[in-house]
């Protein structure tokens, strides 16, 4: 249930994050792109972007990331209000959040005469330099003493990294042949990447974290989500180079996900993985929201640049990110102690109502079952939110030991990103659609189980698991044979 009674004085933070759309050279604003299939017409001329940025800075906003379409900004509510002549208000939305729970989440909006998108701001030859200003929507992860490199022993059935994940995704034979994704740059936008003995002991290549939200430390991950889920990349591609981006604020909430994505995109990684997303109602029959149109175009722009973009399908969430054409969307398959495969009832899957022919997920990784998906033993900062919460939910670990059992489509996304990295090492320059083709054509079909929306798996591609569970070595053979 959504409560849209605005509060003018409560729950509006001191720092607000948003996005400014510069005037599109194609003549159609990003907010009016019904179901965009290309980002190119929405690129802005360089002089228009410069003038748009100058207007934003004069209002007191800080530019935190930029692209050919627009730029992410951060600043006080007063700065946004000066730029838009509107007023920032808050309202509460009850939605699914971390660990499958539901709680009220504060959303922000700008109200006023020129809203909801503050159309036509600034001056430039040919018209206003700013087409729209939108505020960042809250995203949720689909997810002391120094921690030891070895995980604790727990009684419940679970998978360990890297060995179990590598084996069940059939990446081990590829590793034995020397294919490890060596040097392929995989960017991950999440809550952060904290130092942990697990990564150093295995010799994984982790570059210094880039903190996007002003005033946050790059070496901290208050939630632990990004640190833990990133281990899935290396389980599949132990030679990859991880470029972590912290998009969380001081409390660990993903308040700067758009800026993080744009900063990562600007560095031109070969793979860009994202274990988070927004949430709207399901099923959705209405038109694509203006804010989702803007965001979809930024994602589409990355795909058109040749970046392999991976998004988690969601854990009972329905969001725009995995539906953008060209995105590799990651669903979930559960492997039981006897090796049987079934669709995870924790993860999302559906046919897109906005983009013809798009089915989420594309393929699936390894994910646990409802209600909590406590399945993978992952390294996290000791005493972080996940460490405390999962131990309280009986995962068998301590609340300050730097290890926890969790998964979700948040785990599947970096597993699939690792698979993409391994294919890119073997075939540099392979396009995103070819990587998706290779993973889908060779995936292991899963024919039993239902997803979080009660949609059943069946023979062949379906909305429960996509094409099935990723088979890394088979995908490698496919690209070596079919792509010269």
Image (cartoon, rainbow, N blue to C red):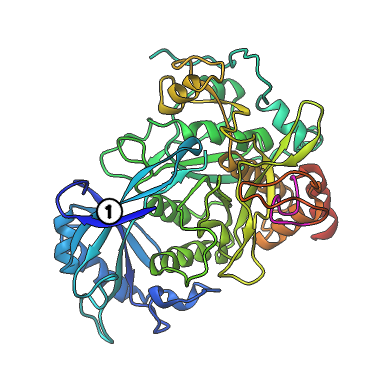
Quadrant of the rendering where the C terminus is positioned = bottom right
Residue 275 falls left or right of residue 116:
right
* Residue lying farthest to the front in this orientation: 1
Q: Residue at x 66, y 58 (%)?
A: 429
Q: Give the magenta range.
A: 461-469
Q: Residue at x 56, y 67 (%)?
A: 304
Is residue 137 rendered to the left or right of residue 233? left
Identify the residue under disc 1. 91
Q: Is residue 134 left or right of residue 394?
A: left
Front residue of 7 and 14? 7
Image-quadrant location for residue 173? top right
Q: Main secondary structure of the magenta part?
A: loop
Outermost residue, right side: 481
Question: Looking at the image, can residue 313 be seen?
Answer: yes
The correct choice, above or below, for 152 with respect to 278 in the image is: above
Q: Residue 226 at what x, y percent from top left? A: 48, 36
Q: Against 377, is 136 above or below? A: below
Across and down, in percent, residue 199 comes to 55, 26
Q: Position of residue 403 (x, y in %)?
A: 52, 21
Relative to the observer, which residue lies in front, 187 or 371? Answer: 371
Nearer to me, 228 or 449 = 449
Inspect the magenta stretch and tell me whether residue 106 lies in it: no
Report the number of numbered marks.
1
Q: Residues within 10 Å of mark 1 (few under 14, many from 20)?
A: many
Residue at (50, 66) in percent of width and height:
301
Q: Which of 321 and 484 lies nearest the eye of the viewer? A: 321
Q: Residue furthest bottom?
A: 126
């Amino acid at each position: 249930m959504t409560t849209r009674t605005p509060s003018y004085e409560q729950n509006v933070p001191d720092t607000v994050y948003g996005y400014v759309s510069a005037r599109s050279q194609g003549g159609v604003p990003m907010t009016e792109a019904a179901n965009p299939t290309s980002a190119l017409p929405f690129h802005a001329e360089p002089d228009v972007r410069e003038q748009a940025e100058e207007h934003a800075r004069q209002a007191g906003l800080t530019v935190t990331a930029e692209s050919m379409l627009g730029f992410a900004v951060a600043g006080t509510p007063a700065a946004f209000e000066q730029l838009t002549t509107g007023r920032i208000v808050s309202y509460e939305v009850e939605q699914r959040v971390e660990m499958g729970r539901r709680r009220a989440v504060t959303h922000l909006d700008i109200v006023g005469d020129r809203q909801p998108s503050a159309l036509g701001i600034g001056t430039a030859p040919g018209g206003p330099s700013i087409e729209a200003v939108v505020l960042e929507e809250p995203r949720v992860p689909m997810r002391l003493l120094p921690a030891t490199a070895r995980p604790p022993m727990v009684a419940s059935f679970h998978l360990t990294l890297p060995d179990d994940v590598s084996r069940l995704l059939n990446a081990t034979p590829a590793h034995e042949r020397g294919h490890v994704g060596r040097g392929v740059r995989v960017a991950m936008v999440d809550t952060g990447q904290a130092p942990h003995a697990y990564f150093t002991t295995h010799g994984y290549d982790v570059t210094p974290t880039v903190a996007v939200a002003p005033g946050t430390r790059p070496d901290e991950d208050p939630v632990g989500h990004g640190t833990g889920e990133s281990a899935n990349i290396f389980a599949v591609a132990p030679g990859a180079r991880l470029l972590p981006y912290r998009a969380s604020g001081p409390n660990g909430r993903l308040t700067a996900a758009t800026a993080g994505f744009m900063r990562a995109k600007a560095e031109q990684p070969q793979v860009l993985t994202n274990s988070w997303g927004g949430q709207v109602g399901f099923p959705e029959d209405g038109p694509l929201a203006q804010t989702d149109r803007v965001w979809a175009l930024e994602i589409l722009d990355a795909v058109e640049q040749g970046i392999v973009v991976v998004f988690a399908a969601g854990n009972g969430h329905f969001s725009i990110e995995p539906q953008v054409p060209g995105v590799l969307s990651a669903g979930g398959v559960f492997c039981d102690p006897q090796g049987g495969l079934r669709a995870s009832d924790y993860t999302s899957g559906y046919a897109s109502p906005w983009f013809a022919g798009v089915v989420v997920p594309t393929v699936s990784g390894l994910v646990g079952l409802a209600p909590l998906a406590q399945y993978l033993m992952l390294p996290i900062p000791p005493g972080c939110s996940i460490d405390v919460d999962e131990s309280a939910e009986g995962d068998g670990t301590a609340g300050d030991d730097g290890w926890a059992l969790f998964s979700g489509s948040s785990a599947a996304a970096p597993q699939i990103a690792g698979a993409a990295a391994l294919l890119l090492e073997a075939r540099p320059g392979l396009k995103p659609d070819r990587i998706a083709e290779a993973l889908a054509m060779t995936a292991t079909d899963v024919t039993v189980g239902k997803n979080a929306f009660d949609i059943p798996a069946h023979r062949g591609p379906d909305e429960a698991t996509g094409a099935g569970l990723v088979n890394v070595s088979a995908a490698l053979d496919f690209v070596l044979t079919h792509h010269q």
